[in-house]
């Protein structure tokens, strides 16, 4: 049979129903058997990772030395930016600070993730900012950009196709572009009004490809720009507190007036009132505070009376509820102003071991009461 010829023939005559396939013969070759390696998945369990004690000392030291070299490479990339800051940085600062619209940050891949953090930092310091994903922008999200906005475009190569193709749209919308890139001759840089050049940066990876040192530099220059903008405009701890009402940051800038009991919840009695009246006020005031402020005719604070004071009177058998409160109140109590940081008020409570602090204004009038329960609820203790 010639090579490549068919191994079947059509039978002659009528009744032919199709080709007759040659019957395959069973191979006599023995199949190799897979042997389970102890500790492998084939053996019924997964291998356990090697522990530091199982590694050679040389391997451990080599790993740590390499990790340190990564940190050093990223640190050098950041330090190298210091000599690159100049007029273009100041121009970028002015565009962001004086922007009548919002600062739109954009970038692809790892640079995009750095851009999201930069946008969040700007927003947390009072600069209106959004992140625009380049791939989503061409499918309608470009509507987030308007005239008067400023674009911060991050790309180490400056050649990201998804980013570059947005440049004509940004130009038509009248939104100036600040390019943050490692190539000042790239398409992104050529289409931008301002270029922040981070320079050619060698990545801290064995292949020299994984974004590491370059993203560290993008991150650092973004922070430098955000903080320089913050420094150049009126924005203090009070404004910061408005944007950070929760968590440790919020507690660090919260003021007493935000936590104190005021209005109907502020327990107040006149110094001429009877002890019984003070107890009634402490009992009926919303929130059941453990104390009451004692004031004179002008509403100025002259003392405080607490649950502890009442218990001590009971212990001494001096519970004459018709006595004037001035005779049993605590005189010259420690107090705070409404603008004092809640952290400072908490420190005073701990130092002097008191559960309540009267809050007075500039004229000495009792405008509130700070109770330890309110500080506990806000997690100051």
Image: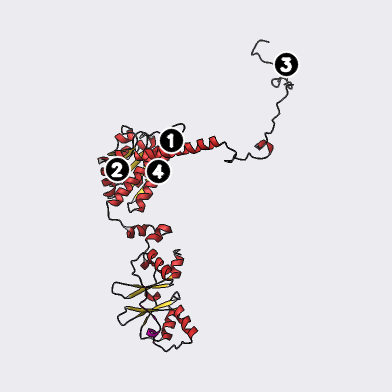
Percent position of residue 168, x then y: 31, 37
State the residue in front, 62 or 234. Answer: 62
Q: Residues within 10 Å of mark 4 (few under 14, many from 20)?
A: many
Give whichever of discs 1 and 3 has the lower sequence position.
3
Question: In the figure, is residue 36 to the left or right of 224?
Answer: right
What is the spatial separation of the Cα atoms under label 4 and label 1, in whole angstroms? Answer: 17 Å
Tell whether label 1 touches label 2 (CB within 8 Å). no
Residue matched to label 1 = 204
- Distance from Cα at disc 1 to Cα at disc 3: 72 Å
At numbered mark 1, what does the secondary structure look like: helix, strand or loop? loop
Q: Mark 1 or mark 2, which is nearer the start of the sequence?
A: 2
Q: CA distance from mark 3 to mark 2?
A: 78 Å
Please give the residue where the numbered disc 2 appears in the rendered image. 173
Identify whether 365 is placed above or below 206.
below
Task: Give the secondary structure at mark 3.
Answer: loop
Instruction: Give the vertical position of 216 relative to 186 (above or below).
Output: below
* Picture colour scheme: secondary structure
Say above or below: 223 vs 205. below
- Circle 2: is it few (<14), some (14-19), or many (20+) Cα within 10 Å? some
Residue identified by numbered label 4: 114
> Marks 3 and 4, how far apart in space?
74 Å
Q: Is residue 108 visible?
A: no
Horizontal side of 94 relative to 123 (left or right) equals left
Side (left or right) of 96 relative to 306 = left
Measured in 3D between alpha carbons, the distance from the residue under mark 2 to the one under mark 4, in whole angstroms, is 25 Å
Give the quadrant of the N terminus. Answer: top right
Inspect the magenta stretch and tell me whether residue 328 lies in it.
yes
Residue 135 location, quadrant = top left
Q: Are marks 3 and 2 in contact (CB under 8 Å)?
A: no
| Label at residue 11 | 3
Q: Which residues are magenta?
A: 324-335
């Amino acid at each position: 049979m010639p090579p490549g010829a068919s191994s079947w023939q059509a039978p002659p005559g009528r009744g032919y129903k199709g080709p007759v396939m040659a019957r395959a013969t069973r191979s006599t070759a023995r199949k190799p058997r897979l042997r389970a390696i102890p500790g492998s998945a084939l053996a019924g369990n997964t291998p356990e990772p090697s522990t530091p004690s199982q590694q050679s000392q040389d391997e451990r030291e080599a790993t740590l030395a390499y990790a340190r070299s990564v940190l050093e490479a990223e640190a050098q990339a950041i330090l190298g930016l210091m000599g690159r800051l100049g007029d273009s940085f100041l121009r970028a600062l002015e565009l962001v600070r004086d922007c009548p619209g919002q600062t739109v940050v954009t970038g692809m891949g790892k640079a995009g993730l750095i851009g999201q953090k930069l946008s969040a930092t700007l927003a947390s310091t009072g600069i209106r900012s959004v992140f625009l994903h380049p791939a989503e922008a061409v499918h309608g999200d470009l509507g987030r950009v308007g005239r008067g906005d400023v674009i911060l475009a991050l790309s180490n190569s400056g050649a990201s196709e998804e980013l570059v193709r947005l440049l004509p749209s940004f130009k038509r919308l009248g939104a100036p572009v600040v390019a943050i890139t490692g190539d000042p001759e790239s398409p992104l840089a050529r289409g931008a009004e301002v270029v922040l050049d981070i320079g050619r940066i060698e990545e801290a990876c064995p292949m020299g490809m994984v974004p590491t040192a370059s993203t560290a530099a993008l991150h650092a220059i973004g922070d430098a720009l955000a903080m320089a903008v913050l420094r150049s405009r009126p924005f203090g701890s009070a404004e910061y507190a408005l944007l950070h009402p929760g968590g440790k940051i919020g507690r660090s800038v919260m003021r007493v007036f935000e936590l104190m009991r005021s209005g109907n919840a502020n327990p107040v009695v006149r110094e001429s009132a009877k002890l019984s009246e003070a107890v009634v006020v402490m009992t009926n005031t919303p929130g059941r505070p453990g104390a009451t402020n004692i004031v004179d005719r002008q509403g100025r604070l002259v003392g405080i009376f607490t649950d502890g004071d009442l218990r001590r009177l009971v212990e001494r058998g001096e519970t004459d509820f018709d006595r004037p409160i001035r005779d049993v109140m605590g005189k010259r109590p420690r107090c705070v102003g409404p603008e004092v940081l809640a952290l400072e008020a908490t420190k005073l409570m701990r130092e002097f071991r008191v559960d309540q602090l009267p809050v007075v204004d500039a004229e000495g009038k009792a405008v509130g009461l700070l109770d330890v329960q309110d500080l506990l609820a806000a997690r100051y203790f």
